[in-house]
Amino acid sequence: MEAFTMLRSLLVSIDRANVDTDAILPKQFMKSIRRTGFGANLFDEWRYLDKGDPGKAASLREPNLNFPLNQTRYSGAQIMLARENFGCGSSREHAVWALRDFGIRALIAPSFADIFYGNCLKNGLLPIVLPAPDVDILFAGVSRMPGFGATVDLQRQVVAPDGRDEMSFSIDPARKKRLLEGLDDIGITLQHADRIRDFENRRRLTEPWLF
């Protein structure tokens, strides 16, 4: 998993509450467990004016030019701003994979659905919970100022928006450490590889019939 330490980026905003995982990645595109290739269908029903089918090239489809992800002013943005309860609905991890595949590294919202929040942290995507008034300030900045961005410093646990005071956020210390070190569940397990190997070797001696 790619480590997360500090990120400087434009902000792109999705000004809707209760955005569910089926909106983030519609179910018909969940055709793989490879974690890649989903970015083209992120927010598919909102990004395109035609109906999307698996295997249909994005270049052949008609984009919705009113949707932020299709607007050049947000090109390359890696921080997404959202409203409350982002990521609600089903528990599909594919929604997070689509965000990461598109290039999103951090999300800022007043609240996230619990399972979605956990899935983000397992995939190197930092979900930042800020008070609603702070989120309103960021939305106003995005609306009024093309090129509005921010720096996210995970070590210090602050968001520093352009021309505004820093905003502090909280995160579980264990989850913070995992992000800083780029450790997913497999990476955490592999830290104990020697002990696991020793256990298996002892087991071969004491319970050889299992092997």
Image: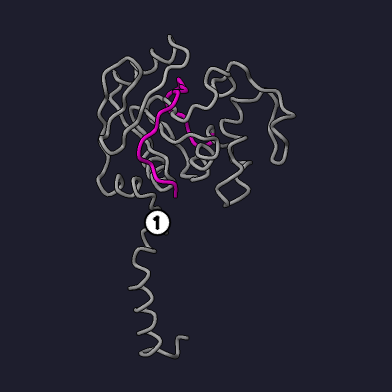
Seen in the picture, residue 145 relative to 112 is either above or below; the reply is above
Q: Is residue 26 left or right of residue 208?
A: right
Q: Is residue 31 left or right of residue 191?
A: right
Seen in the picture, residue 144 relative to 92 is either above or below; the reply is above
Q: Element type at marker 1?
A: helix
For the rendered model, the colour scheme is: one colour
Q: Identify the residue shown where x is 62% and y is 17%.
A: 65
Q: Amino acid at mark 1?
A: Asp
Residue 20 in magenta stretch: yes
Residue 147 in magenta stretch: no
Residue at mark 1: 185
Range of magenta residues: 1-22
Q: Residue 152: x, y in percent?
A: 35, 31
Q: Which image quadrant is residue 53 in?
A: top right
- The count of marks equals 1
Crowdedness of circle 1 by 10 Å Cα count: few (<14), some, many (20+)? few
Q: Identify the residue shown where x is 30% and y is 20%.
A: 134
Q: Is residue 99 left or right of residue 136?
A: right
Q: Residue 69: x, y in percent?
A: 55, 24
Q: Identify the residue shown where x is 38% and y is 90%.
A: 205
Q: Which image quadrant is residue 201 in?
A: bottom left
Q: Residue 108: x, y in percent?
A: 37, 29
Q: Residue 2: x, y in percent?
A: 44, 46
Q: Which image quadrant is residue 16 in?
A: top left
Seen in the picture, residue 121 relative to 57 is either above or below; the reply is below
Residue that sits furthest to the top in the current view: 144
Q: Is residue 1 left or right of residue 135?
A: right
Q: Identify the residue shown where x is 39% and y is 33%.
A: 7
Residue that sits furthest to the right in the current view: 60
